[in-house]
């Protein structure tokens, strides 16, 4: 059961949209949710993904989201024995909203020079995935991006990506960095060029990797009203 958030501004509007924004409408709140969609994180890990948020602001947003029942804090067992933040079941219900918002926002030209964060990139892959382009493809991928690993599975027109070690059951291994993967998928960098420069390494089924990179077509830019 969620708790009422106190001492915060409210739209004082009974509409469900307004009530939802009372909970997740503050600056950085939805991006905190974005950073937790792929699993729990420590405070320091959250700061890496939200480097534009000050420590005080991030702490405040986490407290508010905890009070609202969107996020909870728990201690991991040994050997980690660290405190992490994770989404509650109610918080995870925000995933379709973030996916739809990400797809809508992808049509807005990029003006920031800041590099896309790792979790933001993985979620962008899920957001921009085109089931029609994946017709006939069944493959699993071990994505090794920096120090992180993800298991990506494409089957039956669906893409699932989870953080973790695939345990040797991947058809292909892709080892690269955030910038290179983003440039290949969304920037038009040829896969062969990335491999040739050493920025990307492929193990296993190369053809499956080539198919994977073509599953995320960009949407046309937002329409501009005639002046």
Image (cartoon, helix red, strand yellow):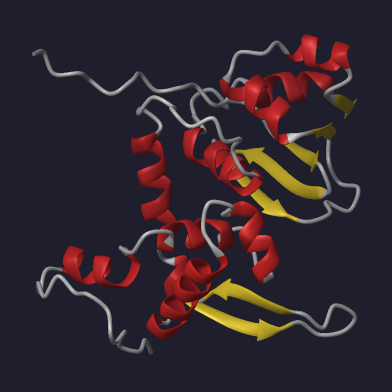
Question: In which image quadrant can residue 36 be found?
Answer: bottom right
Q: How far across and how far down the image is residue 180, in percent?
A: 72, 25
Q: How far across and how far down the image is residue 207, in percent?
A: 78, 18
Q: How far across and how far down the image is residue 116, in percent?
A: 59, 38
- Residue appearing at x 36%, y 27% in the figure: 107
Residue 110 left/right relative to 189: left
Front residue of 53/209: it is: 53
Residue 173 left/right relative to 29: right
* Image quarter (top left, top right, bottom left or bottom right) of the N terminus: bottom left
- Residue appearing at x 81%, y 42% in the figure: 146
Front residue of 169/113: it is: 113
- Residue appearing at x 34%, y 66% in the figure: 24
Is residue 204 among what the camera can see? no
Residue 82 left/right relative to 2: right
- Residue appearing at x 17%, y 66% in the figure: 18
6, above or below 12, in the image: below
Front residue of 226/9: it is: 9
* Image quarter (top left, top right, bottom left or bottom right) of the C terminus: top left
């Amino acid at each position: 059961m969620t708790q009422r958030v106190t001492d915060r501004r409210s739209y004082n509007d009974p509409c469900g949209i307004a009530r939802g924004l009372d909970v997740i409408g503050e600056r950085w709140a939805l991006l905190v949710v974005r950073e937790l969609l792929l699993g729990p994180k420590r405070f320091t890990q959250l700061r890496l993904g939200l480097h534009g948020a000050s420590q005080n602001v991030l702490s405040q947003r986490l407290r508010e989201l905890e009070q609202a029942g969107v996020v909870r804090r728990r201690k991991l067992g040994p050997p980690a024995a660290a405190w992490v933040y994770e989404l509650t079941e109610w918080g995870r219900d925000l995933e379709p909203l973030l996916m739809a918002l990400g797809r809508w926002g992808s049509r807005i030209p990029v003006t920031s020079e800041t590099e896309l964060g790792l979790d933001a990139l993985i979620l962008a892959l899920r957001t921009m995935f085109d089931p029609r382009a994946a017709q006939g493809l069944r493959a699993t991928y071990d994505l090794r991006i920096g120090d992180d690993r993800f298991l990506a599975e494409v089957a039956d027109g669906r893409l699932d990506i989870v953080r973790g070690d695939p345990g040797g059951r991947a058809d292909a291994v892709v080892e690269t960095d955030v910038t290179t993967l983003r440039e290949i998928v969304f920037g038009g960098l040829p896969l062969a060029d990335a491999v040739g420069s050493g920025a990307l390494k492929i193990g296993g089924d190369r053809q499956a990797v080539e198919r994977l990179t073509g599953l995320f077509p960009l949407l046309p830019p937002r329409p501009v009203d005639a002046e």
